[in-house]
Amino acid sequence: MSETVEHVRECAIQWLLRIEDEPESREIQQKLECWLDEDANHRRIYHQISLIWTATGTESPNRLSAKATTCLMLLLNVLLFWTLQQPDVSTRIGQMATIRLPGGAELTLAPGSAINIRPDRRAHSIELVSGAVYAEVDAARLNKPFVIRSRTGEVQALGTRFSVQWEQEGARVDVYESRVQLTPSDRKTQGQVLAAGHSAILHTFGVEPLALPTYERPDWLTGELVFLHSPLRNVLAALQRHDTRRQWLQLSKSDLDTPFSGVLRVTDLDAAYTLLAQSMGLSVDNPGLDIRRIKKN
């Protein structure tokens, strides 16, 4: 049975207190390392509590009064709960970010995206929370596999450049160089190797190949979003990641399912929405400074 976050949090606090009281004890250090290696969440939560504890600059709880210790533990739990709700790395609308990971892997986050970094003994693991991420990985230099996980499965680099983008249908994977291994979250379903120049949607119960052109890099990196028979909902979601105005959709489900093909430049969003409206029979106006209303003609 998997541990609850609350249980791991309590254990992490107890380990921190033991280290505070006996910082020179090799036995405690070794036991702590064994506990940290048991699960990626152990190391993650312990690290977060350590940062919070250091930031408070407080004495060891064993040297505080019982009342002060209780208050401090409550504060730590509140701060940790808030911290655990936040992704490790995120980007705002219209913003991109590039991070370099140990081993030489480099990630670029699309606007409006979020990831969690989940290293463990078995893999360099990244969790895609929302949006899209582009990875450049030299798998031959890594001492363990590099994996990007989503709600529907995982993508393992086999020495490659690739991107993973979360869409309503699942995780879309585009490979620009070498290969990746796709594994649906339903482990009973057989995985698939995806080679350069190919794209697929990674579903919970399988892999759906896509007949889409693949370029040298993701379209959102170039500023030109390329769509081929993409549902309107996915087109609007892609535009929203670049648009500081909030979309107000007055569209039916059938409208949102309608496919669109074309190229939209995010460097001129007004022109992009105008082109989309003309192609799809839509009306786009701005009833407020921060709102973009989209409806059927």
Image (spheres, helix red, strand yellow):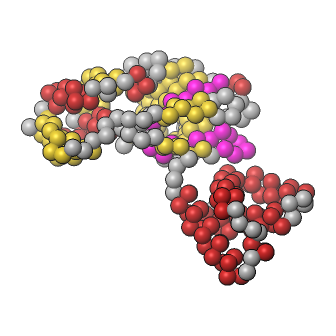
Q: Eyeballing the image, is 80 above or below 121?
A: below
Q: Which residue is farthest left?
A: 297
Relative image position of residue 217 (x, y in whole percent): 46, 21
Which quadrant would residue 104 be assigned to in this image? top right
Q: Residue at x 71, y 42 (%)?
A: 122
In the image, 119 versus 158, the foreground residue is 119
Q: Give the left or right position of residue 244, taking residue 52 as reference.
A: left
Q: Which residue is farthest front?
A: 57
Q: Give the left or right position of residue 21, taking residue 186 as reference.
A: right
In the image, 36 versus 14, the foreground residue is 14
Q: How many marks?
A: 0
Q: Which residues are magenta?
A: 119-138
The quadrant of the image that shows the C terminus is top left
In the image, 203 versus 171, the foreground residue is 171
Q: Eyeballing the image, is 284 above or below 79?
A: above
Q: Give the left or right position of residue 18, taking residue 41 as reference.
A: right
Q: Is residue 220 visible?
A: yes
- Magenta-highlighted stretch: main secondary structure? strand
Q: Residue at x 46, y 40 (%)?
A: 91
Q: Residue at x 62, y 32 (%)?
A: 100
Relative image position of residue 64 (x, y in whole percent): 74, 76
Q: Residue at x 68, y 78 (%)?
A: 68
Which quadrant would residue 170 be assigned to in this image? top left
Relative image position of residue 36 (x, y in whole percent): 75, 54
Q: Is residue 123 magenta?
A: yes
Q: Is residue 234 magenta?
A: no
The quadrant of the image that shows the N terminus is bottom right
Q: Is residue 45 visible?
A: no
Q: Give the left or right position of residue 97, taking residue 237 as reference.
A: right
